[in-house]
Structures are given as structure tokens and as C-alpha cells.
Image (tube, rainbow, N blue to C red):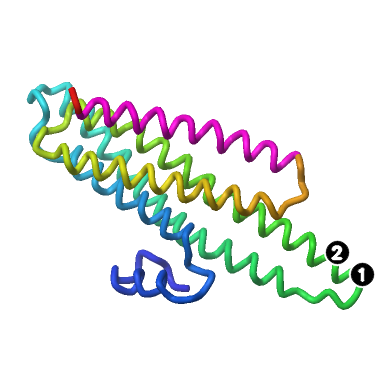
Amino acid sequence: MSGIASLTLAQIVERLAAPTPSPGGGTAAALAGAFGAAVGEMCAALPRTRHGTPEERTRLHEAAREFAVHRARLVSLADDDGAAVTAMMAAARLPMATADDAVARREALAEATRRATRVPLETVKVCAAALERMRDVAVMGARVASSDVFAAIGLLKASADGAASNVRTNLHGLDDEAYVRETTRQLSRTLDGVARAAHAAMAALQE
């Protein structure tokens, strides 16, 4: 699959709609986050601020730079997710003709599955970081962009929730209890941060 960034929007949607395992929900979730970060970047870069102060302009300029980094990372993660799914499928197709084959297949599948949890977990973490910055935009950004800020928050939250579902699903296929426990802990902690940041940003829009 060619890189997501090299495709038109129509091509991306067509590939997501195709009855194939990859690209799938993980790719779509990361792209939703990229759209959310892009909208946040736009809101932060608008020339008007809430009160027109230099301090607001400085903070929003910093936020716009961070959103640009998050946006690029989430586009990259959309590609990574598709590659992770493809790797899992390839591992599942490995031969099991001998005992050695079976061991090699099991180890390859376990590693591919761990990769397929790491990628969406990173998506959740990037969305959490972007949502932390959304409160600044909600507080300091121009009121005319309030609906755009609302959309950005929703996209980032949906991205995190969708990616989290992929993490949980793929963890079910692992026997590595220590890895499952640590990944579950990280996911739970990060999702708590997502919920808090999204709530804080939404509350700031009402002020």
C-alpha cells in the first residue's frame, strides 16, 4: 500500500471501503486524529485571539506548531497501522508443517501482534497530547472558531477511542501476560488523560 499522504482523499476513502483487512479501523482512527489536529492547528493559527493580547498570540503560535507535529505523526501512524495488520496476516500464513515451523510461526505472530498493539497505543498517546493543547485554543482562540474547536475535540476523542479498541482487541491474541498487563495499564492511564483533556477543553468553550 502506497503512503496515505500520497493519495487523494477519494482514494483513501475508497481503500478504507474495500472489503480487505487493511487499511481498516486503525488507519481510519489515526486519520480522524490527523484531521482533528489539523483543525486545531487552523484554529490556533487564526490571526484573531480571544482578547487580542500578545500572550495569547504566543501561546496559540506554540499550540499551532505542536498540532502540526501531531498531525504529521498521526498520518504516519495511519500508514503504520496498515503495515502492522499486513504483518499479522503474513505471520498467520506461515507454514506449520513441522514443530519448528509451528514455533517460528507462533513467535512471528506474537511479535506482529505486539506491533499491532504498539501502533494504536501510540495513536491514543498522540491524541491525548493534542487534546491537552486544545484547552489553550478553547480559552484563547477567537470565539468565531468555537464550532471548529468543538469538531477538533470530537475528532481527537473519536480517534483515541477507536485506536484503544484496536489495542484491546489485539491484546486478546497474546499469551505474554506481562506485556498485556503493562500495555493495559498504559492504555488505561492514557485514556484517563484523554477524557480529562477533552472535558476541560469542552468546558472552556462554555466560558
Please, what is the three-letter code of the amino acid marked with disc 1?
A: Ala
As drawn, 203 above or below 46: above
| Disc 1/disc 2 C-alpha distance (Å) | 6 Å
- Is 44 magenta? The answer is no
Q: Is residue 58 left or right of residue 175?
A: left
Q: Residue at x 71, y 70 (%)?
A: 92
The vertical placement of 135 against 118, above or below, is: above
Q: Quadrant of residue 134?
A: top left
- Mark 2 belongs to which amino acid? Val
Residue drawn 31% across and 43% down? 154
Q: Position of residue 170 (x, y in %)?
A: 63, 54
Pointers 1 and 2 in contact (C-beta within 8 Å) = yes
Q: Which residue is mark 2?
A: 103
Which residue position holds label 1?
99
Magenta-drawn segment: 178-205
Q: Is residue 80 above or below residue 160?
A: below
Give the image location of residue 186, x and y in percent.
58, 35
Main SS of the magenta part reads: helix
Q: In the rendering, which numbered label is found on residue 153?
A: none
Circle 1 crowding by C-alpha within 10 Å: few under 14, some 14–19, many from 20: few
In what element is the residue under mark 1?
A: helix
In the image, 115 versus 184, the foreground residue is: 184
**What is the secondary structure assignment of the residue under circle 2?**
helix
Magenta run includes residue 199: yes
Coordinates of residue 82 in the picture (x, y in percent): 51, 64
Asked if residue 161 lies left or right of residue 181, the reply is: left
